[in-house]
Image (spheres, rainbow, N blue to C red):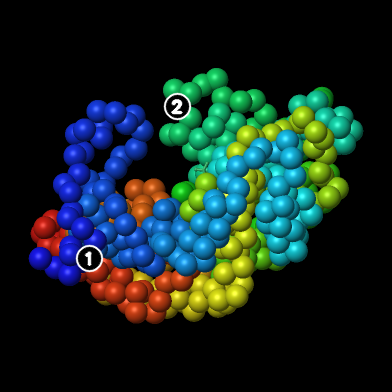
């Protein structure tokens, strides 16, 4: 018996069939059940240890069981965990102040998820169009192909990927799509969509497309977009749900591009894995009034106290520096792997600690093949489409952990190639 087994109790065998009997089948789950975590490590119900380069899909900013989160959570739940927005919540005000002082935004609305944050932005854009933009009756929100903005009806409509929309028609009106990183397409769309009481009122983009394959935005493109928005009275909305909160090596993804949005959304990493969403906007477009938008749980004392603790820890522990150097290290190691297996891998791309390793389109292996083999070795990674491996470890990841992850990954690659009878 290993020391882990003694320390962490008797691993109970998890009953997958029983789970599936009661829980809706909306996810393609891997056949392991995770029971416990610490730092960048996880243990499943059989006591097997994993290095976590998924981090709850880019949410567990400080890894697992971080002392700052434990302290904030226990102190707050002992004091007050929920009260509703019928009253002032001091912890909510404190988190909003932190966000405003550390971003280009002036005002914050809190909700519980990325999709909800984007919904809040979509509604704000529409109200701004109806009340400010010469009373524009049918504002259109331009989004990018291969984007991802969430699964509610409005955000799945904003998501420029038909695979997420099929069977859920009729979709929400008022959206149009353009290819990402293509400025001419945006100019054409604005001209073509200008008709009567309908025109483009906002452009909503991810600074780096996460789900869509870890594709960073071009600086030139985004600066062009900013100018188009300024010239045409169009609001610029950034979906920072995945890339915000330090993941790219700057606090916000827009800092990588040298442009400021009018509105941006945050969620995943904002409270380190406790459910939260936020929509942040500049003062000039804050047109919400009491009764316009709301959330029962949004900004409750428990989650906002933890959010502030996470952000203060990022600042006090200089985690942005860690993200930059660990990101460089990881991309360097992955580039060496590409050089070793050039027929398998085509490219590594990303910023800070959101990176994608792309498999050649015509190669037999898929991202899932390598992810499953990595899991056997003891490394968790996520896919971003069928041919891209996504690496989004906690921002506290160490140099040794990055090295170990790449060792596991290479072992997994060798195993996959061998079982398929391929040499590279
Ligand atoms: C994950 C994600 C969302 C959706 O967030 P949920 O919390 O799952 O609703 C929206 N936009 C982007 C860019 C995301 O990565």
Q: Nearer the viewer, residue 105 or 299?
A: 299
Residue 73 in view (yes/no): yes
Q: Nearer the viewer, residue 250 or 86?
A: 86
Q: Which residue is mark 2?
A: 166
- Which quadrant is the C terminus positioned in? bottom left
Dot 1: element: helix
Q: Determine crowd level at label 2: few under 14, some 14-19, many 20+ residues with C-alpha closer than 10 A.
A: few
- Which quadrant is the N terminus positioned in? bottom left
Residue 177 in view (yes/no): no
- Which mark is on residue 102? none
Give the x, y percent position of residue 421.
10, 59
**162 is higher (above) or lower (below) than 46:** above
Give the x, y percent position of residue 333.
36, 76
Q: Nearer the viewer, residue 368 or 100?
A: 100
Q: Which residue sits furthest top?
A: 170
Q: Nearer the viewer, mark 1 or mark 2?
A: 1
Dot 2: element: loop
**203 is higher (above) or lower (below) than 100:** above
Give the x, y percent position of residue 329.
42, 78
x 48%, y 61%: residue: 70
Between the C-alphas of marks 1 and 2, the distance is 48 Å
Q: Which residue is mark 1?
A: 7
Q: Is residue 205 left or right of residue 6?
A: right
Q: Is residue 129 left or right of residue 61?
A: right
Which quadrant of the figure has residue 2?
A: bottom left
- Quick one: label 1 or label 2, which is nearer the N terminus? 1
Q: Determine crowd level at label 1: few under 14, some 14-19, many 20+ residues with C-alpha closer than 10 A.
A: few
Which quadrant of the figure has residue 128?
A: top right
């Amino acid at each position: 018996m290993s020391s882990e087994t003694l320390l962490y109790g008797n691993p109970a065998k998890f009953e997958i069939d029983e789970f599936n009997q009661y829980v809706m089948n909306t996810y393609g789950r891997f056949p392991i059940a995770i029971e416990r975590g610490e730092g960048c490590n996880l243990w499943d119900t059989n006591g097997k240890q994993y290095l976590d380069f998924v981090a709850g899909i880019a949410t567990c900013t400080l890894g697992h069981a971080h002392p700052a989160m434990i302290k904030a959570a226990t102190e707050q739940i002992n004091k007050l965990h929920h009260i509703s927005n019928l009253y002032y919540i001091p912890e909510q005000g404190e988190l909003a102040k932190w966000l405003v002082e550390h971003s280009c935004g002036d005002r914050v609305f809190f909700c519980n998820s990325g999709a909800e944050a984007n919904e809040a932005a979509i509604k704000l854009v529409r109200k701004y169009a109806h009340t400010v933009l010469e009373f524009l009756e049918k504002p259109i929100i331009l989004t990018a192909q291969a984007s991802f903005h969430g699964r509610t009806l409005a955000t799945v409509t904003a998501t420029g990927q038909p695979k997420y929309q099929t069977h859920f028609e009729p979709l929400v009106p008022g959206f149009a799509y353009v290819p990402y990183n293509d400025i001419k397409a945006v100019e054409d769309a604005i001209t073509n969509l200008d008709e009567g009481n309908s025109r483009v009122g906002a452009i909503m983009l991810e600074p780096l497309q996460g789900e869509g394959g870890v594709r960073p935005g071009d600086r030139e493109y985004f600066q062009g977009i900013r100018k188009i928005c300024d010239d045409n009275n169009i609001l610029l909305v950034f979906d920072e749900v995945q890339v915000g909160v330090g993941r790219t090596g700057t606090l916000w993804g827009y800092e990588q591009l040298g442009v400021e949005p009018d509105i941006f959304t945050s969620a995943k990493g904002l409270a380190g894995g406790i459910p939260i969403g936020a929509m942040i906007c500049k003062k000039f477009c804050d047109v919400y009034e009491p009764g316009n938008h709301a959330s029962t749980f949004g900004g409750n004392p428990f989650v906002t106290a933890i959010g502030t603790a996470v952000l203060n820890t990022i600042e006090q522990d200089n985690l942005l520096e860690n993200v930059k150097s660990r990101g460089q290290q990881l991309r360097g190691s992955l580039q060496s792997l590409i050089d070793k297996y050039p027929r398998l891998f085509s490219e590594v791309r990303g910023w800070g600690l959101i990176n994608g390793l792309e498999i050649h389109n015509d190669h037999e292996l898929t991202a899932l093949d390598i992810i499953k083999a990595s899991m056997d070795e003891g490394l968790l990674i996520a896919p971003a489409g069928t041919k891209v491996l996504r690496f989004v470890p906690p921002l506290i990841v160490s140099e040794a952990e990055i090295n170990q992850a790449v060792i596991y990954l290479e072992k997994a690659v060798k195993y996959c190639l061998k079982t398929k009878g391929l040499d590279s």
